[in-house]
Amino acid sequence: MPLHIALYQPQIPANTGNIARTCAGTHTSLHLIHPLGFSTDDKMLKRAGLDYWPYVDIHYHDSLEAFIEMTEAQAQAQVYLIETYGTRNYTEFDFSNSSQEIYFLFGHETTGLPADFAQARSSNCLRIPQSEHIRSLNLSNAAAIVLYEALRQQGFKAVK
């Protein structure tokens, strides 16, 4: 599967459940980077994606470093960080190469990704345009927005 959503230390079970449902419906892999703020057996998480959970291609990573090591071991992998302080809009990137493994990495719901980690990868830091009246979009909404742009650019091949 060439498209992946990665969540760094997610805290809200319903967000992760909604993202899992989106991943199941789009044949997108889901990567959860520990520590998690909940158990994947959590009642709320299962309620958010219960009917779809068996269809989620889910991977767990012990740390952000372990996740990055895994992606760097792949010859055709590209990691994009999704952050409110990114300088380029997500629509400015070309995700059309459907043979490339594309990872969209989302930060912790309240603090985002570690600042030093994101600064070191600022050329691949994307943002979703939004009003200054909010701190950020809901995590599950942001994941769907970016994922569906990549799917659109790939002609929705993964979901046809």
Image: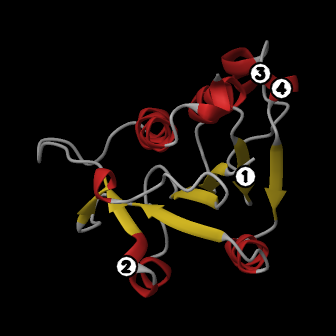
- The label nearer to you, 1 versus 4, is 4
Q: Quadrant of residue 82?
A: bottom left
- Apparent side of residue 44 relative to residue 123 in the rendered image (left or right): right
- Which picture quadrant has residue 75? bottom right
Task: Please give left or right for residue 41 compared with residue 142 in the image.
Answer: right
Q: Which residue position holds label 4?
A: 55
Which label sits on residue 46?
A: 3
Mark earlier in primary sequence (3, 2): 3
Q: Which residue is mark 1?
A: 31
Q: Nearer the viewer, residue 52 or 152?
A: 152
Badge 3 vs badge 4, beta-carbon distance below 8 Å: no
Instruction: Please tell me whether mark 3 sits on a helix, a strand or a loop.
Output: helix
- Horizontal and vertical percent position of residue 125: 38, 69
Q: CA distance from mark 3 to mark 1?
A: 17 Å
Residue 79: which numbered mark, if any? none
The residue at 79%/32% (across/down) is 56
